[in-house]
Image (cartoon, coloured by chain):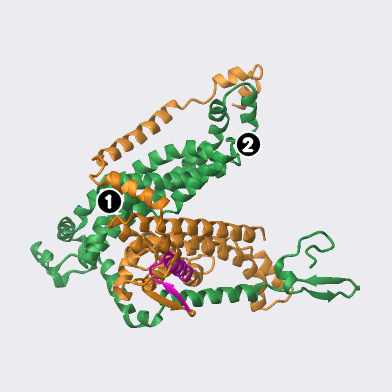
Amino acid sequence: MKKKNATGYRVPLFDRIFKPRMLVLANGHSVAQPRSRMPLIIGTVIALVYLSIKLTGFDLGIIARRGHQFFVILSQIFSPDVFNISAKTFEQFGMDPAAVSFLSIFDGRWWEALWYTMQHSFAPTVFEPLLDTVRMSVLGSFIGATIALPIAVACSTNINRNRASVTILRLLLNIIRTLPTLVIAKIFALIFGLGTYAGTMAILVFTIGVIAKMMYESIETIDMGAFEAMESFGANKFQAFWSACMKQILPTYLSYCLYALEMNIRAASILGYVGAGGLGILIDERIGWRDYNGLGTVLIMLFILVVTIEHLSQYLRKKLS
Amino acid sequence: MSEKQIKAPRPLSIEETYAQRPRRWWVYTLIVLVVALILVWSASGVQYKGIANKGSEVAQGIMRGLVTPNWDLLLGRITEDTTTTKILGITISTEGVPYLLFQTIAIAFLGTIIGGLLAVPISFLACDRVVPKWLAKIFQLLILLIRTIPSLVWALVWIRVTGPNAFCGVVTQSVCSIGMISKMYITAIEDLDVRILESLDASGCNGFQKIRCGILPQIIPNFISTVIYRFDINMKDATTLGIVGAGGIGAPLIQCITSSRWSMVGSYLFGLIILMMLIEWVSTKIRNRLTRG
């Protein structure tokens, strides 16, 4: 079997099985048109979809029969109890519940009723877990990012010339990143006991995996001229890296840290599900009690938090670049 | 002003320029202070209460489990007390790691494909180059909502509809994927080069030909690359969703951790780590080929 054509280009297996079509042009030259790979790709995807449907017990009938239930729950989530002023509350503040309309927002009593509802809703109990979530992710991200930097330096092939240590470190980082955060959190919750400390540790480990990977990839692309010049002056690796490379990678590093913080706030909000502190406990509890209005309140506050942090971090990242 | 600059007596030496470098020490001090304050505040809420009374045992157990995994479970051997199922005429143990891993892949695969398909119309509707601004804003808000609600919550809501099984995982992932995939689709649509359409117009192409030769070749590699990237994420998410009962390897893994059967935990983690690395490697390969063409 001929593996290489006249120009020395290695012919892919596909083109060896399905021979390209030869076209003869008007000027007498012949051109090979490779067969389209589309049928093969589409066939593979369809086969995989069929297999997946078998493996997962996919059944659209369930959605058709019980799908409305999803929207029932969703509509309850979207009427969180913070804004649900009951008729009784209106009466308490001397308003006629039937007469309440859009115009009543100009009435002071409507605001009093809203304030009363907010105070007696689920919202005040959400604050402490919400702040816990922020605390866990801030502390975990900060310590994790600090530890990740030296690890990233040790993992980059242009600074650490020892292949064996680079391979082992990268393998360890890969293993850390493949483990789901919730599993790490569960293990830490068993080791350190339930609470925010376990969550912080889980986020810390997760952050190390993510930031170290992104950092060693960008350290490998920096300009090494200054580093080599410093080394030729007799600086040791640490001094050379500190003064030649730090300036180059610092903006990237900081923006990765902010990105990790953004990601961690989302991740931290569910860690409580396995007992690692934060909002997750409340989410689990509300769903367990089928209190979807309360769940809506939790989610609204999480939504506000995530959007705020995202905007803040995007603003800072724009400043950095 | 400009005259003064011209009359500068002589160019500054390097030392002098260095001495005149902008000094914004107070800005840096302020930043450090703010960060330190935030950290102190965070640390105040996170207290170390020492290792739990079974903590060291758990840590040792996991290490031991990873070194000596349960090989029967890892290879999915069929013994008398395993439940089995038939897929394509092959009998597989439903408790074995291979079956659970394949199920996890299947959930992520179907979820990503359905999510990727659903995201196409949504992202066109959320792109203000295609539809009026007010409509685009509504769909952008929808995408934002889908993205901020954690996938775990979506799963817990869908479980009420479908019951705790792998199908729930598929539906959840289809919904969750829409958020991120649409966001990246929109960027691809906004980067479309419309001048090609004009030249196709000039050469007399009809509407279908314009889409086939002007739009699809620009969009498809971008879309597929996004979908493959999301598949990577969904694989990891599928394990997490399993923990709440949406099928896959998550549920048995957490059960074994809780009941400290470490050799089983070891074999689940072992399979998971190998699979994840394999998938990441393959998806990076495909995406690199797509971007290079």
Q: Can the viewer see residue A315 in this picture?
A: no
Quadrant of the rendered structure where residue A38 is? bottom right
Observer-nearest of A242 and B38: A242
The number of numbered discs placed on residues in the rendered structure image is 2
The amino acid type found where label 2 is placed reads Asp
Residue that numbered label 1 is attached to: A278
Q: Which chain hosts label 1?
A: A
Residue at horizontal 55 percent and vertical 30 percent from the top: A241
Residue at horizontal 57 percent and vertical 35 percent from the top: A160
Q: Which chain hosts label 2?
A: A
In the rendered structure, the answer to whether residue A236 lies left or right of residue A8 reads: left
Residue at horizontal 57 percent and vertical 62 percent from the top: B225
Q: Which chain is green?
A: A
**Does label 1 or label 2 sit earlier along the sequence?**
2
Residue B112: x %, y % from top left: 48, 68
Residue that numbered label 2 is attached to: A223
In the rendered structure, the answer to whether residue A190 lies left or right of residue A55 reads: left
Up-down: is B168 above or below B231? below
Question: Rounded to the nearest whole Å, what is the CA distance between mark 1 and mark 2?
Answer: 42 Å
Magenta range:
B90-112
The amino acid type found where label 1 is placed reads Gly
Residue B159: x %, y % from top left: 31, 71
Q: Can the viewer see residue A111 in this picture?
A: yes
Q: The orange chain is which one?
A: B
